[in-house]
Amino acid sequence: MEGIYENPLITRYASREMMALWSTENRTRWWRRLWVILAEEEQRLGLRISDEALQQMRAAVDTLNLDVAARYEREKRHDVMAHVHAYGDQCPAARAVIHWGATSCYVTDNADLILIREAMRMVRRRLLACLAGLGRFAHQQKGVACLAWTHLQPAQPTTVGKRATLWAYDLVLDLEELDHRLGQLKARSAKGTTGTQASFLQLFDGDHEKVRQLERRVAERMGFAAPYAVTGQTYPRKVDAQTLDLLSGIAQSLHKIATDLRLLASRKEMEEPFEKEQIGSSAMAYKRNPMRSERICSLARWTMSLQSSPAMTAAVQWFERTLDDSANRRLVLPQGFLAIDAALILLQNVVDGLVVYRRTVERNLMEELPFMATEAILMAGVAAGGDRQDLHERIRVHSQAAAERVKMEAKPNDLLERLEGDPAFSSLPIRELADPNGFTGRAEKQVEEFLAEVLEPLVRTGEGEPAPEAQVRV
């Protein structure tokens, strides 16, 4: 038999933890737990369900017979009913009451909401780990002056640590959005076929209060504070769109960070971890390609591309629902989380091993700094008694000559030497006025304030949880 396609998110990139969460086995266990919850709460509210039926259901929750379910699905062409029958085979005393009053979305949608919640919590732990790493890096590099860029053109200097806080703050905003979305998640609970709860009202002989109690209790048993106020057959597909908006937002931040790292690597200022036996190129043995950052960009771009699918799905859910959401959601929801999980693993690995080549950073800054220092030199010259217009003209002439030397002759910028040799500036401490640390403003203090006031309190919210492993698989 020939081989079959394998999803690289599974075979190469995502964590075992995230893969296990979205596995068929885990999803099936949640379906069964939901059937148990429903039956238990129906019994508590007075429906005739025997203790023996509940005992058999509980005993078989983790004893999956997926092969039997697959055989039923080939026959019945309905995934939920296939599992109802497969579960019923294992607990015959409960066969007549499994799924009593429910529609398929009772298990499919409620399970998906649980999986989304747990996946968000995993992503939250990874975000916190990345933020902790970026915080350590920013602290270490808070005073290292470097060339800043606007329009991809040299601009007023900043520090390496300050730049890292820009990366971190994007992720902080993502974390705030994630916490908001987590707080907004609710259960679909027991809503019935079109969301009217007609089947449950019939089961409880028209007792509206018992139907409401059932809905609240099922939601609480699922770990949610409340059910969605109203639904059609499904929970609002708006929730899926919001979930992918969240993942896309994280991906946007990761892509930006990784792109900056790739650009800095090209300038030889900074480098991601490079292992002793790692090969950069099959042909060019000297290469040290930023492959982790490149892969982050690749996975992030894929995640961003998924954002449109749930938005379109939410837009075309005719009346109480259509089934054109099903295949799309089976792909988009798990793969969105798997991809962002993989990208965060890579970022965590990168920030924990970032290397800064300080001398190269300084050299690159000093190539541009003389031009940036001219205003300070001009002001000092005027304060020392010089004629502002004369000094300005001298600086202009020297600057243009130095720029021509850099561009036409590929020689170092000698503007400071030219100014030191000009009698009009001979009394000024030119080198002191051109000290790069004098041009970074409050950058170092901003790093300290950001870490103390924003980042460290956030990172502390994850204390006590096991740190997620950041093992790069390939």
Image (spheres, rainbow, N blue to C red):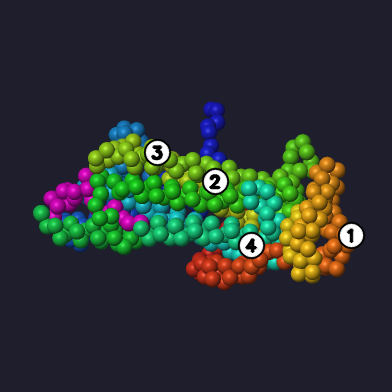
Q: CA distance from mark 1 to mark 3?
A: 71 Å
According to the image, label 1 marks what residue?
Answer: 421
Instruction: Locate residue 364, reporting x and y percent.
Output: 77, 54
Question: Residue 328 bears which disc, if any?
Answer: 3
Q: Earlier in the sequence, mark 3 or mark 2?
A: 2
| 142 or 301: nearer the viewer | 142
In the displayed structure, would residue 387 be above or below residue 397? below
Q: Earlier in the sequence, mark 4 or mark 1?
A: 4
Query: What span is colored magenta in the figure?
Result: 185-204
Q: Is residue 250 left or right of residue 411?
A: left
Instruction: Locate residue 384, reporting x and y percent.
Output: 79, 70
Tell me if residue 303 is in the magenta stretch.
no
Given the image, on which type of amino acid does mark 3 rest? Asn
* Mark 1 nearby-residue class (10 Å; few <14, some 14–19, many ≥20): few
Query: Could you say whether the residue bearing mark 4 is in a helix, strand or loop?
Result: helix
Given the image, on which type of amino acid does mark 1 rest? Gly
Tell me if residue 201 is in the magenta stretch.
yes
Question: Residue 162 bears which disc, if any?
Answer: 4
Closer mark to the observer between disc 1 and disc 2? 1
Given the image, on which type of amino acid does mark 4 rest? Lys
Instruction: Locate residue 103, reporting x and y percent.
Output: 25, 45
Q: Earlier in the sequence, mark 1 or mark 2?
A: 2
The secondary structure making up most of the magenta span is: loop
According to the image, label 2 marks what residue?
Answer: 300
In the displayed structure, would residue 387 be above or below residue 10? below
**Residue contact between numbered discs 4 and 3, judged by CB atoms under 8 Å:** no
